[in-house]
Amino acid sequence: MIRIDSVTKRYPDGTVAVDRLSLEIPDRSITVLVGPSGCGKTTTLRMINRMIEPTEGTILIDGKDVMKQPVNTLRRSMGYVIQNAGLFQHRTIIDNIATVPRLLGWSKDKARERARELMGRVGLDGALAKRYPYQLSGGQQQRVGVARALAADPPVLLMDEPFSAVDPVVRKGLQDELLRIQEELGKTIVFVTHDIDEAVKIGTMVAVMRTGGKLAQFAPPAELLSAPADAFVEDFLGADRGIRRLSFFSSAGLDLLTTPIVAVDATAEQIAARTTPDAPYLLVTDLNGKPLGWSEPGALAAGRIDPARLVSHGRPFVHGKESLRAALDGSVLSPTGWAVAVDTEGRVAGVVSQQTIGEAIRAAHAEGRADAKVAG
């Protein structure tokens, strides 16, 4: 456990970057520091590995004061990932990843073997090993940065806005990759971001900091969204925090309708059998059961599916794996107002209306209130 106890960072000009901050960061979890610019997030992170020295207070890692440890030993015991990866441009990818093991005295062969192993773990093609950073995309460079931080198998990983310089699609992929790696390795990760969506997605615990380096709230993401501590936290979370909260409600309990689903080669009799007043559209799938689009029963030409006249099925959600937020998003994006549920292979599992999703949301809220009452 990392324990930050009444830590203050005050600069010679009187500026207070962090003000009497106390946090207990649990082992084998991702703790996210989030807040507006100037709230002391990065300063706090850098005080953990003594890149910045605290003015007052103590920081303990497994009960040991970081100020009483040799600074180089301390830093080598932690992985550190920054924005834009911070790679050595004159070294190949494999030698970038092998940097810390080599500093710790590993042989070149052993360090490179570890680097190759980690390239696979973070989703990098082994063919990139002999390339240089400038030959990689931004997302690939960030994966190298994560691999380098993990190379010596440190128990603690510090990450300072590591994904903020890449585009949203790559960023989502990197977040998913981090969660996958964390599930496998179980590191103690401290992650800095200014993006509340990122904090809510990856954080086991989220520390919201306010300008001046004071802690506003420290809680699991679901609790943060349901019960902000004050007006500042509520404002920082944004007007759509209710939608974000749906990310913590599973779609597994949704009552899916399978009747209005037909294959693209369906006969007139099959189409007629699938037409129901409960759903004003038919969902058409390809021969492998994957969604192609919606068709109004009245638009069917001579009892046959006309693929050219289908409308978009929107964004499908993976039933049971994705949340009610994903299901609601799918229904909103669908021109029919119905969401398409698929299995993990992308095959249609059923369809669900906005009304049914709304009922599931109300039930989830009611269950949450009941659980809170019992816990209280």
Image: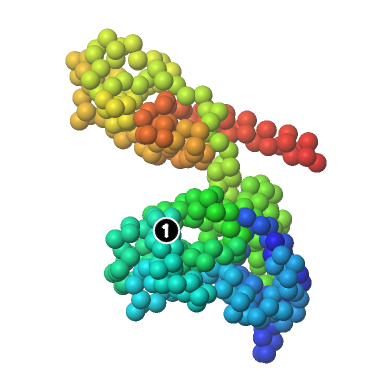
- Identify which residue, 76 or 60, lies in the foreground: 76
Q: From where the camera sits, is residue 159 visible?
A: no
At which x and y percent is residue 133? 34, 71
Residue 51 x %, y %: 59, 79
Viewed as shown, does residue 264 lie left or right of 245? left
Q: Is residue 109 left or right of residue 39?
A: left
Left or right: 72 in relation to 271? right
**Helix, strand or loop under label 1:** helix
Residue at image position (49%, 39%) is: 322
Q: How is the image coloured?
A: rainbow
Residue 270 shown left or right of residue 329 in the figure: left
Question: Which residue is disc 1 drawn over?
Answer: 117
Q: Quadrant of residue 279?
A: top left
Q: Quadrant of the C terminus?
A: top right
Q: How many labels were placed on the picture?
A: 1
Crowd around label 1: few <14 · some 14–19 · many ≥20 (10 Å) = some
Asked whether residue 361 is in view, the answer is yes
Q: Specify the quadrant that holds the N terminus.
A: bottom right
**In the rendered image of this protein, does residue 339 appear above or below residue 167?**
above
Give the residue at x 44% y 67%. 110
Where is residue 10? Give x, y as percent: 69, 83
In this view, 4 is above or below 323: below
- The extreme right residue here reads 376
What is the x, y in percent for residue 331? Answer: 43, 35
Above or below: residue 195 compared with residue 304: below
Taking the spot 50% from the left edge, 75% from the top edge, the residue there is: 105
- Location of residue 15 (image quadrant): bottom right
Question: Residue lying furthest bottom in this view?
Answer: 12
Q: Is residue 339 above or below residue 123?
A: above
Which residue is depicted at the point 29% across and 31% down?
A: 292
What amino acid does circle 1 point to?
Glu
